[in-house]
Amino acid sequence: MHVKVTKAFGLTAGTVTTLTATCTTPCKSSGSATGPTASVGQDWDGMLFFEDAVVKDETHINVATIVMAPANPAFEGQKGGSGRAAAEIRCDDTFRRKNPGCVVRHFIPTMTEMAQLPTIAASIRSIQQRGGVGVPNQPLKALTRITDEARIEKNRQAVCGRSVVGPAPKGMQCDEYPFASTLNGGTATPKDARGVAWVPAEENAAQGGLLGGFYAKNRVLNGDHFYVRV
């Protein structure tokens, strides 16, 4: 959890807020997070934990209720008020050779691993700067993952096929952005907001592993959104 105070009014000096959570069986929640909420700009992190039951190759969605209870210890006998915020917790066991895991369903993760690949990173940065998709904190431009292998290959051939770009220079391979494994790939995105580049073969080979690792770590399933920062 990350909390940041954006508005404070009244006698707020010394106020702290505690976050706890509940969820319905078979989900179990534990932990709490406490931090200052007395003035605008204060921010802090905390951890809440969820456990759920999910079978192989399936997902399970549970609605967790997060309780926010502000209080001021200096006020004798004060009982903090509370507000409830529902959050969908989605657990899955769908990634091959990976343990099951859970995420807050509507959180959009950001991929930063592509910064390790200088040529690919420069290409993505150039495309994003001229209006490309996947720019962090722009939900309407988020990338959307797809898992249909036929669609992925069609996307790849549409922009990086030999009939489109010609033979590759020695040691180089065609790389496209948006990624072929997204709904935005191929020619789905307007031409001025997508692009291809010749990149070192070793970078292109590493890219697939980094992208697959990001999907698994962040539980990015078919139809889920994500951003890319390079």
Image (cartoon, rainbow, N blue to C red):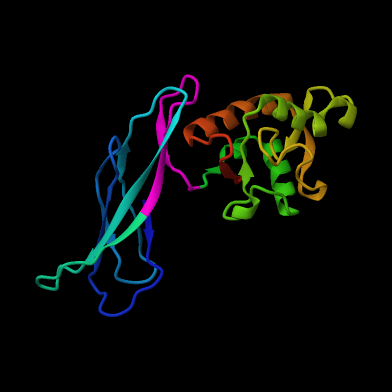
Residue at left offset 70%, top offset 40%: 178
Q: Taking 220 as reference, is 98 above or below it?
A: above
Q: Residue furthest top?
A: 97
Would you say residue 47 is visible in this rendering?
A: yes
Q: Nearer the viewer, residue 108 or 90?
A: 90
Q: Taking 153 as reference, is 133 above or below it?
A: below
Q: Does 223 lie within the magenta span?
A: no
Residue at left offset 33%, top offset 30%: 53
Residue at left offset 83%, top offset 27%: 161
Question: Residue 172: image x %, image y %?
Answer: 78, 26
Q: Nearer the viewer, residue 146 or 63?
A: 63
Residue at left offset 56%, top offset 40%: 224
Q: In the picture, which quadrant includes the C terminus?
A: top right
Question: Residue 177: image x %, image y %?
Answer: 72, 39
Question: Residue 107: image x %, image y %?
Answer: 48, 48
Left or right? Give the position of 3 relative to 193: left
Would you say residue 174 is visible in this rendering?
A: no
- The quarter of the picture where residue 203 lies is top right
Left or right? Give the position of 196 relative to 218: right
Span highlighted in magenta in the image: 86-107
- The quarter of the picture where residue 225 lies is top right
